[in-house]
Every structure is written in structure tokens, then in C-alpha cells.
Image: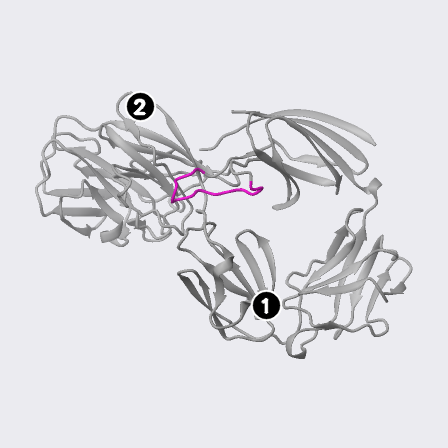
Amino acid sequence: MVRISSILIASAILLSCAQIGSITGGPKDIVAPYIVTSQPLDGQLNVTTNLIEIEFNEFVVLQKASENIILLPSNVAYETKLVNKSLVLELKDTLSRNTTYSLYLNGAIKDLTEGNDTLIQLVFSTGNDLDSNRVMFEVNDAFTGEVNKNIVVGLFDSLRKKQPIYFSKTNDKGIAKIRAIADGIYYYSAFDDKNKNRIRDLSESQFASKIPIRIDSSFKDSLKLSLSFPRMLSNALDARFISPYILAVRKPHQRSFDSLSLGSYDISKLSKVSLSDDSIHYYLPEYFESLQVILDTLTKKVRNTEDLKELTLLTSPKRHVLLPSQCCLELVFNTFLDSMTMRQEAFRLFDSRDSSYQEITSNLSIDKNVLRFSKANYSCEKVIFQMDSGAVFGPNGIANDYIETIIECKLPENLGVLNIDVQTQVGPWYIELVQSGEVKALQTSLEQSEKVSFTSLLPGSYSIYIVEDRNDNGKWDAFDPLTFSFPEKRISYPRKVRVKANFEHDIEFVIQE
């Protein structure tokens, strides 16, 4: 076997900056309206007025003014109207003395034709000074590492506050900048504010810190934030039919399945498969229009949308590749299997190279909703597995339609080896090889610097990730909004590694904190 070696160094980057300001223009078909002039001007001091007027470069429409126009501090009532190309705010109260105000247009202004919008901030002061502190943020996706754009980043004066007192949005580079901040101590968060309520909802990708920062003229840091959808909370229960006869249940990580029930139905009679500590599939012997899922004090009613007419595969890949260590082809159906026929030629292997058939008379078995075929004693270097209609049966006598899929049994010389010398102080951690978004190989419970070897790899390009596994549970944990624990770090090797057949590849993965 030929050996190939290479060395690359990766940096562990966890947590990014969006700029607010007057829009500076650009091609009309892709750029949002921008401010031509305003009264008061952006940054103006000693403002005394009961009218704010902003003129745009083009005719605009107003979008949900009561929700998307925000004047902070929020101690002044106002009415809004459009006059030609200008937005006018008539103030109903007197502005406070010696106070810096920020007027946010949070997607409130769109152009008439293309509908482009943006976040605009206009800042002015009623005193001799303007709050001038700034904070930069860099925001990315905690799982993929990709930058996140249009993410709201906010500063709060209390953890109890739902809406920020200062905020911004990230640009296309995942960068946000909050400006005109008064000296003080602040908490910060970032969230994908789909409903534009400026609240960090549990259904949104997010990050928040319970450790405050002091912001003044000496604050120069750029804060790096990694967003993820939060871990399932103790008051959340997820249940759904993935087929009319398979019920998937996912519980909060603090709860136990021991107390789970399905209304008055005896759950102990059901076959089940545990997919993880938090997820189970239940196989139902009959059709239910709905089921009441109960876990301690949590309940969820789940409705079935349609009954089954025939057995089908949950996923229908055109090709199954079996490695030397894999014994069997597994076909996963949309319900449990009651029985299987062994009539002549109901199952067979077809070799297109010489148009020959092998009848399968043994090595077939069923387990819940899985049909398993063992390749032992059968020639299947590259053959088509064929299965006649009516070969297997499920509830109420439903049967399968004709099924075929390619089987490729790989030999050791068709595969490659990847040796990774990991140098890190992270621990515990695990390592995974990813191809086309799917984890192809995984090794867990590793500590600091170790050498890891992956054998029997299919030729192709792989992405490599080291995952900080703080609780050593062998899986990536997202942000927890109850404890404010950060998402676990995912550190990617700087480039994809190409594995060749009958080659042994050596690489060095150095992680610099």
C-alpha cells in the first residue's frame, strides 16, 4: 500500500461584526433605499425638536411601522407618516435632556419595486456629548463554522430583559457593529430573529452569555459568537408519525422514557428501537388516527395524516456499498414487517455483466421494519438485488411493490487508510469524517494529543472535524438556554483530504487555541 503524508495547522475559532449606519447606495436593483439627508443629522448634538424627518434616495413603502421603527430610549411616543420620499416622526413627548437617542429602522423601509430593505440607525443627542462606545461581533454557525448574515446582535442591561436596548445585524461576512453605546455593564446575545420581535425565542438559532461585559472608551474587543438551535428544554416534548405505523418520540435530555405513555394504550406491547438517549421509534400494530403522548407532566397529541396502501422503503438509495466488515444489506420499511414469503425467485441477484441470476434461498431475515440479507455464500461484487412485489407483508395484509437496488461488495484493495496525528490540549474530544454532509466514520472518548487511524475507507474526499466533547457523550451538544452553556466547539481540518484506493495517507492535525 502506497503511503502519502501531509501537515496542516487548524485554528480553533468559536465565536463575529455588523455595521449599522446610513446606507451608502449602489445599484438600485439590489441595494436598499438609503438616507439622502435627515433632521436631525446622524451624530448631531444639542437636538431640540418634536419632529424627525428622514429623506431617502427613492420612493419607499412603510412596513409595519409600529413593530419595525424603534426609538431608544423608549420614553417618547410618536406617530409616523410618509411624505413623498421622506419618513416623518411626530414626537408626542419631549426628548429627555442630555440623552443619546438611537432611531432604528429594522426592515421598516422598502423600495417600491425590488422590495429591498435593511437595518438603518440614526443617532443624535440632546446634550453636548454623544455616547460613542462601539462593540464589534463576529457571528458564525456553531456546527458548520459558516458565517451567519442578518443575525440580530443585542446588548441588555439585565438577563431578565427580553428585548435589547442596543442592537445591530450581521452583514454578509457575519460582522456586526453596535454603536452609540453609553458606558455601562451589559449582557449580550445573538439570534436569528425571523419574526422580527427582537426577542430570543427558543425556536430560533441563538447564543447568549450570562457573563456581562463592561463597555467604555477602553473596550476594544471583538466578540466571537457561535449560534446553534438550543438543546431541547425540560418543558419540550417532540412526537410525530414518520409513517402511519411508526411513531417517533424525542424527549428533553433531563427526562426519562420510563414514565412515557400513549394514553390508555399499553405501551409495553409495542416494539421499539432506541436511536439515542433522547429518541425512540415505536412500531404500532394497528392504525391510530391520533395518539396522546404523555411524559410526566408533558403531553402532546399527535395526528396521523394518512393510512398505508403498500409497504415502501423509508429511504430508497439506488446503491448500497458493503465494506469487508459489513455482513448485510438492510432495507428499512415504513412499517414493521409481519412475514416474508420464500416462494421461488421472490428474491434474487442479477449480474448485468453476464446477465446471470442467483436465486436467494437463505440468509434473509426480518426484524421489526428491517429486511436483512447476508452476503455470506453469495457472489455480490456488483449485482442488483431484486425483490418481487408481495414478498413481505405488514399490518392488515399490506405488501411491498417491486424493489431493486445495487449491491457493491468492496475488497480491501478497493479501500484506503487515513492516519491522523492529532495534536491538541482539548479533552475529551471525538473525531469524525464527513462526506456530503454525512458522518462516514467516528471515534470517540479521546484525550488531548492522540494518533487516530481510519481503515477501510471508500475512495473520495473527506472533511475532518475534531469536536470538543465536554460531557464525553460522543455527540455534539448545542447551546443550552437554561444553563447558558456554550455549544461545543467543532474544529475543522483546513482542507478536505482525498483518500485513494490501496493508499495509506498520513496527516498531522495541529489545533492551536
Quadrant that contains the N terminus? top right
Q: Is residue 242 left or right of residue 39?
A: right
Q: Which residues are magenta?
A: 473-486
Q: Alpha-carbon neighbours of circle 2 within 10 Å: few (<14), some, or many (≥20)? A: few
Q: Is residue 358 above or below residue 163?
A: below
Return the residue at label 1. 270
From this view, report whether residue 447 is shown above or below residue 61: above
Q: Position of residue 5 (x, y in %)?
A: 73, 26
The residues bearing labels 2 and 1 have C-alpha atoms spaced at a distance of 60 Å
Tally the marks. 2
Nearer to us in this view, 50 or 303: 303
Residue 414 painted magenta: no
Looking at the rendered structure, the kind of residue marked 2 is Phe
Considering depth in this image, is 5 or 444 the residue closer to the camera? Answer: 444
Q: Position of residue 495 (x, y in %)?
A: 62, 32
Residue at the top extreme, as displayed: 218
Which residue was labeled with disc 2? Answer: 219
